[in-house]
Image (tube, grey):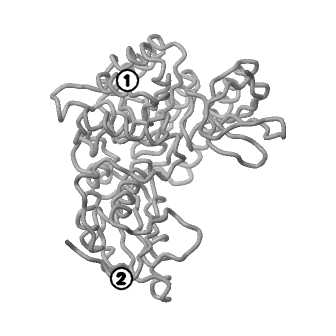
Amino acid sequence: MKVRSQQANKVNVITLGCSKNIVDSEVLMGQLRANQFEVTHEADKSDANIVIINTCGFIDNAKQESIDTILRYADEKEAGKLQKLYVTGCLSQRYKDDLEVEIPQVDAYFGTLELPQLMKTLEADYKHELVGERLLTTPQHYAYFKIAEGCNRPCSFCAIPLMRGKHVDRPIEDLVRDAKRLASMGTKELILIAQDLTYYGLQAYGERKLADLLRHLSDVEGIEWIRMQYAYPSQFPLDALDVMNERANICKYLDMPLQHVSDNMLKTMRRGISRRRTIELVDTIRQRVPNIALRTTLIAGHPGETQQDFEDLYDFVEQTRFDRLGIFTYSHEDNTHSFTLPDDVPADVKQDRADQIMELQQGISMELNEQKVGQTYKVLFDRKESGYFVGRTEFDSPEVDNEVLVPATKNTFVRLGDFANVKINEASDFDLYGQLVS
């Protein structure tokens, strides 16, 4: 058995990027704690002697943020404020050789699947019996819940398969066990994530099993909301919608990144779906779950995007009226298929197109929110901030969607992590305001 130095080691874990990285950091922190490390997450107080940065390498802005963060802590190490600096995650997976040359102050770089090697470098045991256990960085009442790793989709613009590998399912029994453990710790909401939720089951069981997984998780006592994020549109398993209708604790919410709608762009992006089938799918989902909240993400300025392609996308957003929407400007990522194409849409045009879509969505969101005034919703409260208790309805995911704000007066009591009924009395573009009702 390895024995560490008598000096107490304190590790500060820094997480950059998406919710999948958050889960990876939480698993890492669980392993560290089991090895008697004192561990913090993004601590303001700089008293850790070891820093581990979990990086993102998805698009240019994320890569730059990761590099800037590494450089910041490399400077602290050179100044004697740190003993050890390690880097893991997607950027490290993708650019390890370059990073080792460019930022040699880092003691070691690790890929996305090299947690055992990282633990060994820390002279700690990787405890296989802890697989699935985590030290949550989110409020205790909700947790991101990764059901699979990697991706088999051939999207031309995406570097995720380069960093995360092929799709690998986690078995249903393991996921149910983890859900029960989280529920016993006070978690009430599971936010299902993967690179592609709708592919779930094909690797492990030879058929799509998302609906079966939802039923099993829905049966876990204490889990009151189950939310689906990152659902790929092509070959969408419609039986998952039946479970959404059957089970009260499956949120009527779906995050389905469409990326574009013109046939020209969908073909170039290798999305495996056409404009007609995309529109039919959205219509089918809304028919089968009439009050569902649909969230999507789009890309502006992919190579070959013409003004007509953009106008088709704009018209689609205007007509479809998504409840939630985000849009990215295209990032030219090396080693992807799109990188072989000329990045022929100027940066200012990309940004202008993205801004036009978001301005359109702002008006749609305002109109949809105004329709909620006078209605009462079940709200899960996440935090208290700037004189308000801040929560969400089942139609909203943390960090990215609308919030419900209730004034924190001396006569208003809300326990964070609990549900309460709120009557909406005012709406803004992306938020709702209300008061508690019994």
Residue highlighted by disc 1: 219
- Which residue appears farthest toward the bottom when viewing the image? 79
The residue at the point 48 percent across, 33 percent down is 296
Which numbered circle lies on residue 6?
A: 2
The residue at the point 44 percent across, 35 percent down is 190
Q: Position of residue 142 (x, y in %)?
A: 50, 40
Vertical position of residue 94 compared to residue 296: above or below? below
Vertical position of residue 431 compared to residue 238: above or below? below
Q: Quarter of the image holding residue 38? A: bottom left
The front one of 149 and 295 is 149
Q: Position of residue 244 (x, y in %)?
A: 43, 18
The residue at the point 23 percent across, 50 percent down is 165
Vertical position of residue 9 compared to residue 174: above or below? below
> What's the residue type where badge 1 is placed?
Asp
Q: Position of residue 45 (x, y in %)?
A: 58, 72
Q: Quarter of the image holding residue 422? A: top right
Q: Residues within 10 Å of mark 1 (few under 14, many from 20)?
A: some
Mark positioned earlier in the residue sequence (2 or 1): 2
Q: Position of residue 61 (x, y in %)?
A: 48, 59
> What's the residue type where badge 2 is placed?
Gln
Q: CA distance from mark 2 to mark 1?
A: 46 Å
User: In which quadrant of the rendered image does the C terminus lie?
Assistant: top right
The residue at the point 55 percent across, 75 percent down is 46
- Which residue appears farthest toward the right when viewing the image? 410
